[in-house]
Amino acid sequence: RKEVEQDPGPFNVPEGATVAFNCTYSNSASQSFFWYRQDCRKEPKLLMSVYSSGNEDGRFTAQLNRASQYISLLIRDSKLSDSATYLCVDSGNTPLVFGKGTRLSVIA
Amino acid sequence: EADIYQTPRYLVIGTGKKITLECSQTMGHDKMYWYQQDPGMELHLIHYSYGVNSTEKGDLSSESTVSRIRTEHFPLTLESARPSHTSQYLCASSEQGDYYGYTFGSGTRLTVV
């Protein structure tokens, strides 16, 4: 099944930094995506959905660029608690396919 | 306030034993899933169900079986556990439609010795 591609990282950033992850996809018909967050040895948790209009929730902003076929997640003012793996998932590829994601470490 | 429950949380068992991993959800979701995940690796789909009496195998070849007799309950059974089954097993559920994300349980960490 078609998947999405993510830079595995790790991204090591200082507290307070702004960090952005990109995720590319190959299925031009894909219309929406999910960003999940997974802490070490825990279950994935849905962070936000992304449609063509984008989505913002506090310090987190997600965008979908259908022309270039990528999804982005921007985290502003990074906190230590943001350290996790972030997974980009095509919502139309069901059952959902979860890749390895991008690992983020926020450092004090 | 978990709405999807997995038991046991941790299990250490000997080779050859039969085990059942429990998963229950209180959200009335028709769709349920089992994924397997090793540390640092991606999730692999092993079974899924779109409703009562409906089950399908996922992408990962597995010696496990599932049943879906009630909407809220989706147990996973290993008839004869092997060390290669050592992994984390994650159960999830979702509403109908492609625009609903999955809610995961806390997982069962299985070790077969």
Image: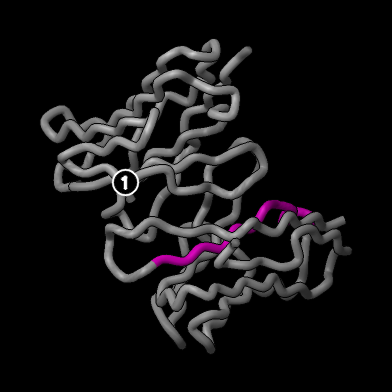
Magenta stretch in the rendered image: B83-94
Say which quadrant the N terminus of chain B sits in: bottom right
Q: Majority secondary structure of the magenta segment?
A: strand
Q: Which chain carries label 1?
A: A
Position above or below: B14 against A16: below
Residue A18, x across and y down, in percent: 41, 15
Q: Is B98 in the magenta? A: no
Residue B33, x across and y down, in percent: 49, 66
Position above or below: A40 against B85: above
Going 49% across and 20% down the picture, which residue do you hit?
A: A78
Residue B31, x across and y down, in percent: 42, 72
Q: Is B84 in the magenta? A: yes
Going 31% across and 31% down the picture, which residue do you hit?
A: A61
Is residue B80 rendered to the left or right of residue A92?
Answer: right
Whether residue A24 can be seen here: no
> Depth check: A15 or B76 in front?
A15
Mark 1, secondary structure of its residue = strand
Residue B16 occupies quadrant: bottom right
Q: Residues within 10 Å of mark 1 (few under 14, many from 20)?
A: many
Position above or below: B85 against B67: above
Residue at the front extreme, as displayed = A58
Residue A14, x across and y down, in percent: 54, 10
Looking at the rendered structure, the number of numbered marks drawn on it comes to 1
> Depth check: A5 or B60 in front?
A5
Is residue B84 rendered to the left or right of residue A9?
Answer: right
